[in-house]
Image (tube, rainbow, N blue to C red):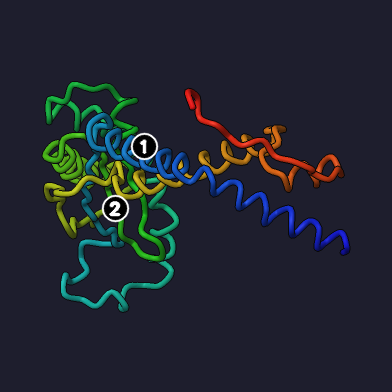
Amino acid sequence: MNEKEIYLIDLVDLIKKVFKHLFLIIILTILFGLGSFAYSNFIVTPSYNANATMIISSSSKNDDQQDLADIDFYQIQANKALISTYSEIVKSKGADQVIKNLSLNMGYEEFSKKVSIEPVKDTQIISVNVVDSVPARAMDIANETANIFKSSVGDIMKVDNVQILDGATIPVEPVSPNVSKNTILGAIIGLVLGIIISMFKELYDISIKSVEEVEEYLNLPVIGVLPDRKEGN
């Protein structure tokens, strides 16, 4: 028997021994899954995402019904390159105005963590995303930020045509926590932990439990076995 075969036999034997602790593995899997479920449902504060979108074009003289393909290609590229700059400038200068207009009980740092203004890839569209624990407040912040953006970006960057494409609505489902994902992740952690504990218990258990193990480890023949008598008999 070569070394590879011996290793395979040892591995199969270890797996069999681990499965002797199947009850422990199942219990840990269930406990960690239920723990993650309870934590996600009852402890973590859910967060909601509201989104408003805008589009920047070169001039308000363009007909609203004009196909976007007719807009000058180079102007589109220039606007796209400047969108990130618009976003950061308006966000820094408009935050105080949004907080004031909505009477929000938060400072600039907290506002910045909730709000992101980003360009949509390969378009002139800007997306205002707000993540907040209160759905209605997330919607209000997104819409007000879009309005402030529209009114102030022209003065800052000399852009004269910003249109709001879609206003934010009240989000219904939270974006976090993901209860299903967290529950499954918790169950997997419990499963892996149960297997690891079972492996350690088997690997570090040096007690001999059978006649076969006596013959294997001591290389001695067994000439007799004492019966296992229950106490009191």
The answer to whether residue 17 of the structure is visible from this angle is yes
Instruction: Identify the residue at horizontal 24%, vertical 78% (top origin).
Output: 67
Q: Is residue 76 left or right of residue 202?
A: left
Q: Which mark is residue 31?
A: 1
Q: Look at label 2 and name its amino acid.
A: Ser
Tell me where residue 82 appears, x and y as whole percent: 41, 52
Is residue 74 shown above or below 81? below
In the image: residue 137, left or right of residue 216: left
Label 1: element kind? helix
- Amino acid type assigned to the residue bearing label 1 in the image: Leu
Q: Position of residue 157 (x, y in %)?
A: 34, 46
Residue drawn at the location 44% of the way across and 43% of the way down: 23
Pick the front one: 209 or 141: 209
- In the rendered view, would you say 205 is above or below 22? above
**For the residue carrying disc 2, how many other residues have a C-alpha within 10 Å: few (<14), some (14-19), or many (20+)?**
many
Is 225 placed left or right of 168 in the picture? right
Q: Position of residue 113 (x, y in %)?
A: 34, 33
Residue placed under numbered mark 2 in the picture:
127
Q: Along the horizontal axis of the image, is 213 left or right of 196?
A: right
Q: Position of residue 49 (x, y in %)?
A: 24, 45
Q: Is residue 90 visible?
A: no
How many residues crowd around disc 1 within 10 Å: few (fewer than 14), some, or many (20 or more)?
Answer: some
The front one of 85 and 29 is 29
